[in-house]
Amino acid sequence: MVLVWRGWGPSLLFIASAALVLFPMAVRAALGEEYWVSHQSFLGGLAGVLAGLLGLTVRLALLKTDQQSLTDPETGQTHIFRLRHELFWIDIKWWSVLIAALGIFYMITGKLPWDP
């Protein structure tokens, strides 16, 4: 499998995986297996929304730190250069939005769009 990224793009894979694995584990440990089974679609969707929000938070933090401004001495114009953080040529903010949207869809319907 080929993984194409730029900047901190792959970090979203780790963030989303951690949220989608650790949140259900924490709910099961705190509230019990029966609660998880009876509210699985809502809590699973909530894990997806949290993963998306974490991805957006990381992207906003990177946006503040990964910029450089240069001023053209002739014209006095300031140019801002930012490092891009992408996974498969798509910025991680859009991947985060997609993950959160899938979480909301799973909350409402109890299944993912590709489920039969």
Image (cartoon, rainbow, N blue to C red):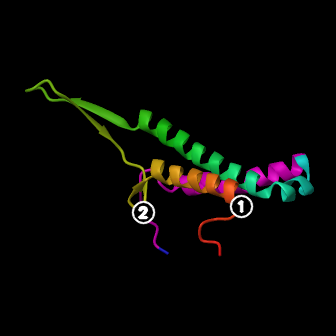
| Residue 105 to residue 2: above or below | above
Q: Most extreme residue toward the top, as rendered?
A: 76
Would residue 8 be seen by someone viewing this image from the given angle? no
Would residue 77 be seen by someone viewing this image from the given angle? yes
Depth check, mark 2 against mark 1: the one in front is 1
Amino acid at the residue labelled 2: Phe
> Which sits in the foreground, 116 or 98?
116
Q: Most extreme residue toward the front, as rendered?
A: 109
Q: Report the residue at 46% width, 72% height from top.
A: 2
Q: Report the residue at 71% width, 61% height from top.
A: 110
Where's residue 12, x and y in %?
54, 53
Identify residue for label 2. 88
Q: Which mark is residue 110?
A: 1
Q: Is residue 107 left or right of residue 87?
A: right
Specify the principal SS of the magenta part.
Answer: helix
Q: Is residue 77 left or right of residue 98?
A: left
| Residue 112 to residue 7: above or below | below
Amino acid at the residue labelled 1: Gly
SS label for mark 2 = loop
Where's residue 70, x and y in %?
23, 31
Residue span colored magenta: 2-30
Q: Quadrant of residue 107?
A: bottom right
Q: Report the residue at 42% width, 37% height from top.
A: 63
| Residue 60 to residue 114: above or below | above
**Spatial separation of the CA atoms under disc 2 and disc 1:** 28 Å
82 inside magenta stretch: no
Q: Is residue 92 left or right of residue 14?
A: left
SS label for mark 1 = loop
Where's residue 6, x and y in %?
40, 55
